[in-house]
Image: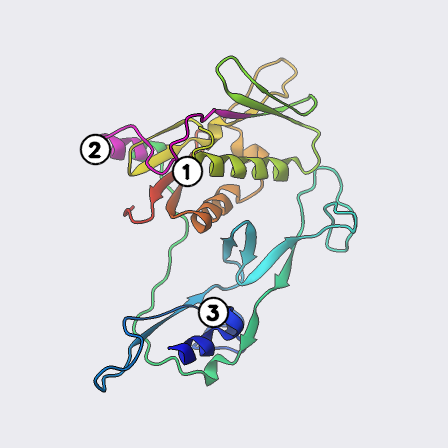
């Protein structure tokens, strides 16, 4: 088994296919798991080893921790020497512009065509992030006969609600009369959409880990976290607040990236509920959609 492990994980890291392999383009495949029920040959019977190869072509976005990957390339934000966000040439971005991410190769490659993979047993495609509606979630909860309780939250005694207010004001954080932590994000913030996307991602992680709460409904198997309720636009000159502005104030594909990030960090399946009253449906990964 050690020889097999060394073959597919030299230096203990993933390696990609250097040239085209089984019809897949170069640097799009990696052996991601090797397993065997037995550690050695017994009674002359061959040892059966399962080798899992993951195909991630350019354009398929995934996350490892907080790092965004396009295929197998890490996407690193371009920065100036002083740490400011920069364009592809290293020049500071104008105010309001979204960060530029540059591809970086972090995995070596080998000639897969020279490796013995054995016989192909099974091949399947993983679907993208599922989408549903709040109505469908409510119907599923109603049919289950169980509403209440969020099993994946840690049992913390204090889980304050969170709100993000975009306003023509200075940055500030306070607590309202209901105990809600309210953070004011200035509308003039540089790269506002990127900053809000990062803050919303942190709030969702805190919600899952039981550090805070946001508007939600669910049971011990699934929870609809209404992320759209967190963000409020308070920039109107007439003083009226606007809700349902998640898509307007976040980066393109934010919800898709957030769902992938959460599934890479937690043992959860995540579906998207689009729309002004949207959010994420969280389930234990062992639960079927």
How far apart, in angstroms, are the residues tagged by discs 2 and 1? Answer: 20 Å
Asked if one can make out residue 225 in the rendered structure from this viewpoint, the answer is: yes
**Viewed as shown, does residue 286 lie left or right of 28?**
left
Residue name at image x 47 percent, y 24 percent: 160
- Res 30 label: 3
Q: Which of marks 3 and 1 is in front?
A: 3
User: x, y percentage for residue 150?
Assistant: 34, 33
* Relative height, residue 9 to residue 56 (above, below): below
How far apart, in angstroms, are the residues tagged by discs 3 and 2? Answer: 42 Å
Upstream in the sequence, badge 3 or badge 2? 3
For label 1, the SS is strand
Q: Give the range drawn in magenta.
A: 137-163
* Relative height, residue 116 to residue 242 (above, below): below
Q: Are the residues flagged by discs 3 and 2 in contact, CB closer than 8 Å?
A: no
Residue at the disc numbered 2: 143
Front residue (pair 153, 73):
153
**Viewed as shown, does residue 23 lie left or right of 85?**
left
Asked if one can make out residue 274 in the rendered structure from this viewpoint, the answer is: no
**Viewed as shown, does residue 219 lie left or right of 79?**
left
């Amino acid at each position: 088994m050690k020889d097999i492990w060394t073959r597919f994980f030299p230096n203990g890291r993933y390696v990609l296919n250097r040239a085209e392999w089984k019809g897949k383009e170069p640097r799009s495949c990696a052996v991601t798991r090797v397993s065997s029920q037995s550690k050695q040959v017994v009674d002359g019977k061959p040892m059966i080893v399962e080798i899992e190869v993951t195909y991630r072509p350019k354009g398929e976005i995934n996350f490892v921790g907080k790092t965004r990957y396009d295929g197998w390339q890490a996407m690193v934000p371009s920065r100036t020497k002083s740490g400011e966000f920069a364009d592809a040439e290293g020049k500071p971005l104008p105010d309001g512009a979204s960060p530029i991410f540059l591809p970086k190769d972090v995995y070596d490659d080998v000639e897969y065509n020279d490796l013995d993979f054995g016989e192909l047993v099974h091949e399947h495609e993983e679907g993208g992030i599922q989408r549903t509606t709040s109505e469908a979630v409510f119907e599923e909860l109603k049919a289950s006969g169980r509403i209440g309780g969020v099993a994946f939250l840690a049992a913390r005694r204090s889980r304050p609600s969170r709100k993000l207010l975009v306003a023509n004001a200075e940055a500030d954080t306070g607590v309202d009369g209901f105990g809600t932590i309210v953070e004011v994000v200035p509308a003039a913030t540089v790269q506002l959409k990127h900053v809000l996307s990062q803050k919303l991602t942190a709030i969702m992680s805190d919600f899952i880990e039981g550090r805070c709460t946001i508007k939600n409904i669910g049971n011990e198997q699934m929870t609809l976290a209404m992320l759209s309720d967190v963000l409020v636009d308070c920039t109107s000159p007439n003083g009226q607040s606007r809700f349902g502005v998640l898509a307007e104030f976040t980066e393109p594909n934010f919800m898709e990236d957030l769902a992938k990030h959460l599934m890479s960090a937690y043992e959860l399946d995540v579906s998207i509920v689009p729309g002004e009253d949207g959010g994420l449906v969280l389930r234990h990964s062992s639960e079927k959609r």
